[in-house]
């Protein structure tokens, strides 16, 4: 395997692994809080579930960038030679979603956990809790866009 291929595959790995790990941690945090609320009031399951799912999107965004890189470097059909500079560009293109996706998923998990506490006391305020959590999502979407644009023009 050439250095360009190694860098490109490393880009795929960090684009998928870091946001996925952040999402797992964020969903875990909200899920733990949600389990406590649902224990006391099973009717709040739907509201809690929405808040738990929100931090999971960053993992999807990272997977999307990983798949885009995979298709561009033809990993499914034998992966032809990639120059070192192109490999480094793929790696650099993966960094925004990898880093921001990881951090924002954890942060969104914390906001969603707070939202679960809000729903426990005031179930009618679930919309506000979702908006607060979705604000963190904005930065993950911007990172997805940045990674997409960089990777698309290589």
Image: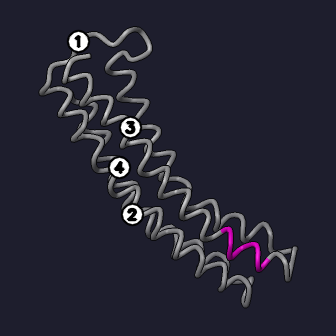
Task: Identify the residue at horizontal 44%, vertical 14% (top origin).
Answer: 76
Residue 36 point in image, percent of width and height: 76, 79
Task: Identify the residue at horizontal 74%, vertical 85% (top origin).
Answer: 120
Q: Does 35 sit left or right of 11 as displayed? A: right
| Residue 129 vertical position relative to residue 106 in the rendered view, above or below | below
What colouring does the structure picture have? one colour
Which numbered disc, 1 or 4, marks the residue that appears first in the sequence?
1
117 or 126: nearer the viewer: 117
Residue 77 point in image, percent of width and height: 41, 9
Which numbered disc, 2 or 1, marks the residue that appears first in the sequence?
1
Alpha carbon separation for disc pair 1 and 4: 25 Å
Tell me which segment is drawn in magenta. 31-37
Alpha carbon separation for disc pair 3 and 2: 17 Å
Q: Are marks 4 and 2 in contact (CB under 8 Å)?
A: no
Residue 146 numbered mark, or none: none
Neighbourhood count class around disc 3 (C-alpha, 10 Å): few under 14, some 14–19, many 20 upward = some
105 or 84: nearer the viewer: 84
Q: Which residue is mark 2?
A: 103
| Residue 109 vertical position relative to residue 80 in the rendered view, above or below | below
Which image quadrant: the N terminus?
A: top left
Alpha carbon separation for disc pair 2 and 1: 33 Å
Q: Which residue is mark 1?
A: 81
Q: Does 78 sit left or right of 131 as displayed? A: left
Neighbourhood count class around disc 1 (C-alpha, 10 Å): few under 14, some 14–19, many 20 upward = some
Q: Which residue is mark 4?
A: 97
Q: Which residue is mark 3?
A: 13
Q: Are marks 3 and 4 in contact (CB under 8 Å)?
A: no
100 or 146: nearer the viewer: 100
């Amino acid at each position: 395997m050439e250095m360009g291929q190694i860098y490109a595959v490393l880009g795929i790995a960090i684009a998928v692994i870091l946001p996925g790990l952040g999402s797992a941690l964020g969903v875990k945090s909200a899920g733990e809080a949600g389990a406590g609320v649902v224990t006391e009031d099973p009717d709040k399951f739907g509201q809690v579930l929405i808040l738990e799912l929100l931090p999971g999107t960053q993992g999807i965004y990272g997977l999307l960038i990983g798949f885009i890189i995979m298709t561009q470097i033809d990993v499914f059909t034998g992966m032809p030679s990639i120059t070192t500079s192109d490999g480094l560009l793929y790696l650099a293109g993966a960094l925004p979603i990898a880093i921001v996706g990881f951090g924002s998923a954890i942060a969104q998990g914390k906001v969603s956990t707070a939202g679960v506490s809000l729903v426990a006391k005031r179930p009618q305020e679930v919309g506000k809790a979702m908006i607060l959590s979705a604000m963190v999502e904005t930065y993950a979407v911007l990172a997805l866009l940045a990674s997409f644009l960089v990777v698309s023009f290589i």
